[in-house]
Amino acid sequence: MKYLQKKRIVIKLSGSIFSLAEKDDQHNNNYYNSFKQYSDILISLTPNVQLIVITGGGSIARLYINFARKLGLDEASLDLLGIAISRVNAKLLIASLGHYAYPEVPISLDDVDRFVESNKIIVSGGLHPGQSTNATSALIAEKTRASEFINATDVNGIYDSDPRTNKNAQLFDKIELGKLLHILLKESSMAGEYDLLDIVALKVIERSKIRTKVILSNPINISNTIEGRKFIGTELVL
Amino acid sequence: MKYLQKKRIVIKLSGSIFSLAEKDDQHNNNYYNSFKQYSDILISLTPNVQLIVITGGGSIARLYINFARKLGLDEASLDLLGIAISRVNAKLLIASLGHYAYPEVPISLDDVDRFVESNKIIVSGGLHPGQSTNATSALIAEKTRASEFINATDVNGIYDSDPRTNKNAQLFDKIELGKLLHILLKESSMAGEYDLLDIVALKVIERSKIRTKVILSNPINISNTIEGRKFIGTELVL
Amino acid sequence: MKYLQKKRIVIKLSGSIFSLAEKDDQHNNNYYNSFKQYSDILISLTPNVQLIVITGGGSIARLYINFARKLGLDEASLDLLGIAISRVNAKLLIASLGHYAYPEVPISLDDVDRFVESNKIIVSGGLHPGQSTNATSALIAEKTRASEFINATDVNGIYDSDPRTNKNAQLFDKIELGKLLHILLKESSMAGEYDLLDIVALKVIERSKIRTKVILSNPINISNTIEGRKFIGTELVL
Amino acid sequence: MKYLQKKRIVIKLSGSIFSLAEKDDQHNNNYYNSFKQYSDILISLTPNVQLIVITGGGSIARLYINFARKLGLDEASLDLLGIAISRVNAKLLIASLGHYAYPEVPISLDDVDRFVESNKIIVSGGLHPGQSTNATSALIAEKTRASEFINATDVNGIYDSDPRTNKNAQLFDKIELGKLLHILLKESSMAGEYDLLDIVALKVIERSKIRTKVILSNPINISNTIEGRKFIGTELVL
Amino acid sequence: MKYLQKKRIVIKLSGSIFSLAEKDDQHNNNYYNSFKQYSDILISLTPNVQLIVITGGGSIARLYINFARKLGLDEASLDLLGIAISRVNAKLLIASLGHYAYPEVPISLDDVDRFVESNKIIVSGGLHPGQSTNATSALIAEKTRASEFINATDVNGIYDSDPRTNKNAQLFDKIELGKLLHILLKESSMAGEYDLLDIVALKVIERSKIRTKVILSNPINISNTIEGRKFIGTELVL
Amino acid sequence: MKYLQKKRIVIKLSGSIFSLAEKDDQHNNNYYNSFKQYSDILISLTPNVQLIVITGGGSIARLYINFARKLGLDEASLDLLGIAISRVNAKLLIASLGHYAYPEVPISLDDVDRFVESNKIIVSGGLHPGQSTNATSALIAEKTRASEFINATDVNGIYDSDPRTNKNAQLFDKIELGKLLHILLKESSMAGEYDLLDIVALKVIERSKIRTKVILSNPINISNTIEGRKFIGTELVL
């Protein structure tokens, strides 16, 4: 029995592309156009790879989480709120991808495993409280034996310090996983505030030697990364 | 075997109380205070009645639905998006009600039926595409044999014409169900735009003779309605 | 990636073809032969279209509903009984279609959406209380982007008055949706008694502009309708 | 912690009490009255015991099974049809028992185990293909540690030969389980035709030493059996 | 529409091949090699047939069952423990079969029915308490219309008496099903101790005329049996 | 409405108490006695607190994981194997606790949340791949607003170095969470090898300020810890 499987790539999309807002029409038009561009790029990549896209919660999730925290909701339940919104975002992307995407949002690793059999694009939100969508993405890459995990973020990649506060922060071209682990240990883990690759993600990447890149999220850069061209971002050295 | 069951009342809460927004801090403080007042009133009513609260999708649902419609999503799936957000809103209210509420959001009528056995406040979002949260509320009232269905809305009750466009619109104190049916037939049923009591809700109310009031949503008016005092709103004559 | 999707057609089959009864053997033989003819026609159509068949509850459902209503069961639960029987009927049709049918009966719109990926015939019963199988069929047509919705009934189509009581009732060749809406408003909605196209079905058809025909249910007429030949029935003008 | 658990009794009700039929009104009235008497007796017993009632498929199940077998459905799927109808029958009994019954029909042994925590009457249909409702009843008795399993049938109890064909058949007052096992081995196991206690039921009864009686099904005889009075039926000697 | 379905064969694998143990390294190496040989043989057979493999609980299941019985667990729950372990064993085999196997373990007959649509090897554990994996295998063969059921055991086939205690026990080449039924009636049904083909399995085999062989479990003998060569084992005469 | 909730305590039990093995009878007797002592202590504590017990996978899980890793199973799936076994262990403990325990093993945080409503002892295994049972325990403590999390381990508490290799390792009476975080960062995260409190557990403990103790697992020490007496173990300083 011959069995030809396209290679699989896991992409975690920054929640910011799902950040709907009640702003003026011009904003919404721009936003809509940008969203379509992402969707078009993903479709254009499907002849060669099977994509598994993980969507974050974005600003709407933060809105709910902040409000619910004020109401006294426990942190585990706040995580669940964020996951619920990330799944709505996943449905939005599925809507845009049309029949190129598998129609259902998985709610467990086992679901992902079954859905990839369709050979379509799989779009997942978060899966479990206490676990960032980054860590979930790494687990999904592990479970589906993806050849690569691409984390598309709102920054250019991994810096030696926070580029939002330090003008002289240096972007790494490549960084060793062990070194990154130490940098990340200082981060907090309040729901909705995970950044880049957290510790669990790194541990998973380490144990399964998953080829990983943290890149700037925009359609062209994603396409460049997946098709092996030069890209803006940082590659992990395993 | 003596078995004392508190009487049950179904309340559909206008989605507007869940309309989180990225506005200024003052807005959010006011909003938070208002939300807490609703929650406090619901808790204060629990010694005498078992409440079953149905939450709408509000402005966040509209945000998603409008965007997804532009992406070309079919109307049934738009309904599902709205339901997903209404469930997140339900979780928010459960968070605020604490242990007075049953911890889980039902996803079917059968779930509602099991959860009411807990004697706690049940909080549900929408249940099914093609069906407004009003119709769902009526069905839930029917299934749980609730003694009353209160529809808390953003207007004072049922008018003879749209009060937003007609300054002279008259508020009904009472209205016969048959008469209301004819008024509503002119309404459209695009996802997220159902108004007051739609036709399915009325048909359910009619077939099971459910005592129904359409009232202005605010904590004091809800309390007045449930405890049999004078209230702002319209009662259906069955 | 080329992706060729057969066009999809949703057919609601009158519950009467599932009306098993403890009658004499000759009756049962005739009934069996008729059932097989339906099944054979559906199979013969599959090379060109993907069929999604919705089965009603028929006389067995009415038997249960009438008895349970006498026992005092609420209307929402009566709907659930009817749905349960319609799903048994769906299994019966799947049995007859053999491997041309997807083996499982969907219990939600999401299930339908996943099952159509199989390219096989999907057979569904009712999905939700308070919603006729007609309305459910329209929603399924909407969700699966079917090119047509055919409602196969026990009458020749839509008349200007009830042909069972009015000998001079006129059959419409075509009817405008708005006109039909007004005719239907007079109907009751007791479980198991929905007729032809109810209001929710029409609202769904309207919002998504679904091409719709109400036809006389028999194998040849169904085949004629689907393959674009002359048929006995009424077409909706959208 | 004091924890007082009412003793539990499992009753398998003959499917014949669920044998709805399109007969004349007088028949239906008699049938309705009989059904209510069963329901009333079960309610009257609840102050002292927790009942777990298992409902058969009855004549409607046979109708479906016979028709589907003619359509060529496999035997395992025929079992599933029978189970589906037995669950509808269970819903009918729950409707009649009102709030004395747990509102949901279990679909697994684990469900039964959770539902009994409610201390209400549990009503179950069949659970698994290839297993008679008798065997399922014995398993449920085992899992819930019921003190007794009563099989209410259409005959007076266990005879030394088939009383329908042999006028001189002798009714056993008591019978040893081993002896019964040999009698039953001659029976066929076509779906819907299991009789009295089949082999799996007996094996379960044997391994867990479950006190078992096969009795004539009528309300008074059921009441007599449960309350320890003289009854028409056969007791198993373990 | 041409539709080519590979013939399906159900194989029940003796639990002994899953009997992990904390023994010395040499044992574990031998065991690993043996397990891989089974897995390789199954893969080598897939071009011609679709295999449905049922895994037993083996020694680990017995370990848990014995311990839990001592703790006072009821027999139905002991069955459930055995099923849980058989499913873990199924996952182990899936791991070894890689992408030749469907990734999920079915938990109901309906699951099996859907999963076989993938045309991959399906691996199932037990499905229901009170039912041996042999009986479950027969039901699965019935439901999936498999052309054959092969029961791979730790003995050479069916003997006229227990070969473990009787040196002169004779191996049957073929045995009539009725004869086998009488032999098996003497067996006990304590959880975890079912042997060869139990009564329920035989009843299912009988009602659906399933071609059945009880064979010695080893990779070569399995391959010989499936490919129609001479094998060590007993064939049932239906 | 008065509502009295016993305080809740989460206990993670070392997998070693579930380490069944095919050893000699004396071993199994000792093991059985020890297991019963744990169970008796947990029951004896229930009048005052509601316990939520999390069970590890123990030696059987390691057996499966090691074997499956050799077969080439990915690490996420290995985690799932460990979770499956931890759930079997949970069932074993439920068996021993009898009606003091809720009968079902939760498979999600939401399940835990519903099950605690029963006021019975809840017994859970692992919940999610990539997450140790320690981290899961911390999340459960967070979600159920438990007043304390007790991690019962095979060692006396937290040392400044590994006591298995360093004879002079010092046991901490108390340790600051930040300090512990740095110690743990050196640990690997291969499935089945998580130790004491891993990083995710600590992050959860930190964000929700959960009172936490790592203690030596034996029945008396557990009882001492819960009832506020002197215990062998280390308390976290938050």
Image: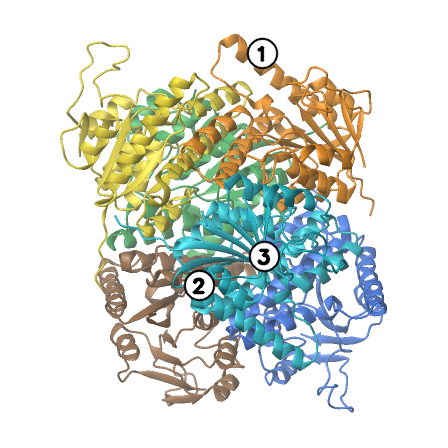
Chain colours: A green, B brown, C blue, D cyan, E orange, F yellow
Spot occupied by residue F227 in the image (x, y as percentages of width and height): 17, 37
The image shows residue B155, relative to residue E180, as above or below, that is below
Q: Of tags 3 and 2, which is closer to the observer? A: 2
Residue C10 as seen in the image, left or right of residue A143? right
**Percent of width and height locating residue C217:** 78, 71
User: What is the secondary structure assignment of the residue under circle 1?
Assistant: helix
* Letter of the chain that mark 3 sits on in the rendering: C
Q: Is residue F159 above or below residue F167?
A: below
Q: Residues within 10 Å of mark 2 (few under 14, many from 20)?
A: some
Mark 1, other Cα within 10 Å: few <14 / some 14–19 / many ≥20: few
Residue nearer the viewer, E90 or A26:
E90
Q: Do discs 3 and 1 share a chain?
A: no
Q: How many marks?
A: 3
Measure the C-alpha gap from mark 1 to mark 2. Answer: 56 Å
Q: Amino acid at mark 1?
A: Asn
Q: Which mark is residue C107?
A: 3
Marks 3 and 2 on same chain: no
Chain containing the residue with disc 2: B
Residue F187 left/right relative to A28: left
